[in-house]
Image (cartoon, rainbow, N blue to C red):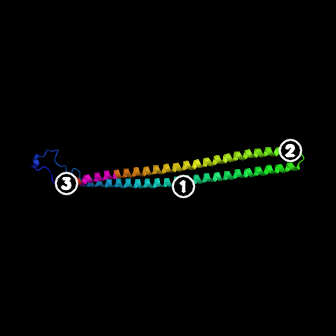
Amino acid sequence: MVSKNVGPAEAMSPEEAPKILTKPLPEILHEAAEAARIAQEAAKAAREAERTATKVSVKAAKRAEEAHKAGERAAQMATRAAASAAAKAEETAKAARQAAAVNRAAEETDRAAREAAEIFKKATEEATRKAEQASSAAREAAEAATKVSEEATAEAARMAEKATKETAEIARKASEAAKKPADATDQG
């Protein structure tokens, strides 16, 4: 590179004199190699962080799907149990009415059968209500698991992006650090 100062060399002040080879070449090369090694390690760490984030995201999505399926199965089982209980209650009430027709105390038996049917009806309604609550809770759990999965995926993406930016910054600084001693060597 040509100096813009065209006057004699003695006209330059000591502050303006070029500082060529202020460090020995082996030291400059060692610093450049160290900077390159640091940049490689940072890039490796960023790739590992990205892989880990991806694995966590996949696991979270699988768990959300499993929770959703489990909730659906629980709701189906509760609905079947409620329907079965209702059918049994109806059968019991019918049998009680038939027994009342055969029994001499038909009126008393019929009244007892109606009370039993009402009790079974209330029990069936309670079972149905609980089944609906279980189904609702299962849906909410599945939705919450999905939300957690989405948040984990977003966080993993943010972490990977941050690691990538940090790696790029470290690599840029390492490159600049390696370039400065090389430029000083070129000027010599």
| Front: mark 3 or 2 | 2
Q: What residue does disc 1 label?
A: 62
Which label's residue is closer to the chain start, 2 or 1? Answer: 1
Question: Is-magenta flag for residue 147?
Answer: no
Answer above or below: position of 125 versus 188. above
Q: Which residue is rendered at x = 86% and y = 49% of the image?
A: 101
Please state the extent of the stretch shown in magenta in the rendering: 170-182
Residue drawn at point x = 63 percent, y = 49 percent: 135
Q: Residues within 10 Å of mark 1 (few under 14, many from 20)?
A: some
Q: CA distance from mark 3 to mark 1?
A: 59 Å
- Badges 3 and 1: C-beta atoms under 8 Å apart? no
Mark toward the start of the polypeptide (3 vs 2): 2
| Distance in Å between CA atoms under marks 3 and 2 | 118 Å
Please state, as top left, top right, bottom left or bottom right, where the C terminus lies in the image: bottom left
Callout 3 secondary element = helix
Circle count: 3
Residue 177 is covered by the magenta coloring: yes
Q: Position of residue 51 (x, y in %)?
A: 45, 55
Residue designated by label 2: 107
- In the picture provided, is 122 more to the left or to the right than 19? right
Q: Nearer the viewer, mark 3 or mark 1?
A: 1
Q: Position of residue 103 (x, y in %)?
A: 88, 48
Q: Nearer the viewer, residue 1 or 108?
A: 108
Structural crowding at the residue carrying mark 2, measured as other residues with C-alpha within 10 Å and reported as few (<14), some (14–19) or many (≥20) = few
Q: Tell me which amino acid carries mark 3.
A: Gln
Pinpoint residue 106: horizontal percent, then vertical percent: 87, 46
> Left or right of 170: which side holds 117?
right
Query: In the rendered image of this protein, does residue 108 appear above or below residue 48?
Result: above
- Graded by Cα atoms within 10 Å as few (under 14), some (14 to 19) or many (20 or more), the crowding at tag 3 reads few
Look at mark 3 in the image and give the residue it sits on: 187
